[in-house]
């Protein structure tokens, strides 16, 4: 299947409105820099154990950076469509693996 022919069943949901995120800061940084959000979450979690106030301040500062970058540089619709088609391909693969098991 080609990525251009696949239609996503789920519409794109902005980061702060997703059900599996708090504000989407770590996921947003991961998307912006092309890294796994876990690589941002783990140091932030360690910082929470060391100094919660500093961690919260850094989290909201990073949140303002993500928010500002999304306002100044919105995702092009073609890129958003390709991301959604990739996610639908992954979902389809997972469903096929469950059926095969």
Image: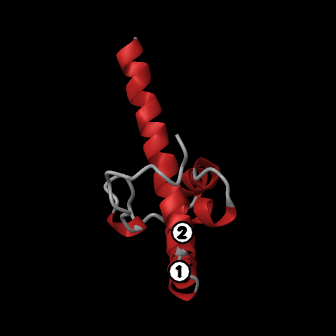
Residue 15 at x, y percent in the picture: 42, 66
Residue 22 at x, y percent in the picture: 38, 61
Location of residue 74 with respect to 6 vertically, above or below? below
Query: Which quarter shows the C terminus?
Result: top left
Q: Are marks 2 and 1 in contact (CB under 8 Å)?
A: no
Which residue is identified by label 2? 78
Q: Which numbered tag is attached to residue 74?
A: 1
Location of residue 94 with respect to 78 vertically, above or below? above
Residue 68 figure quarter: bottom right
Q: Nearer the viewer, residue 70 or 45?
A: 70
Location of residue 80 with respect to 35 vertically, above or below? below
Residue 58 at x, y percent in the picture: 57, 71
Residue 66 figure quarter: bottom right
Q: Is residue 60 left or right of residue 40?
A: left
Location of residue 83 with respect to 16 vertically, above or below? above
Q: How many marks?
A: 2
Q: Nearer the viewer, residue 51 or 68?
A: 68
């Amino acid at each position: 299947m080609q990525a251009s022919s696949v239609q996503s069943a789920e519409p794109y949901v902005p980061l702060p409105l997703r059900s599996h995120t708090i504000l989407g800061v770590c996921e947003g940084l991961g998307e912006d820099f092309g890294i796994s959000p876990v690589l941002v979450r783990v140091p932030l979690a360690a910082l929470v154990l060391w100094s919660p106030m500093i961690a919260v301040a850094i989290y909201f500062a990073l949140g303002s950076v993500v928010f500002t970058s999304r306002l100044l540089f919105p995702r092009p619709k073609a890129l958003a469509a390709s991301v959604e088609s990739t996610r639908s391909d992954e979902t389809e693969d997972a469903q096929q693996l469950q059926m095969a098991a």
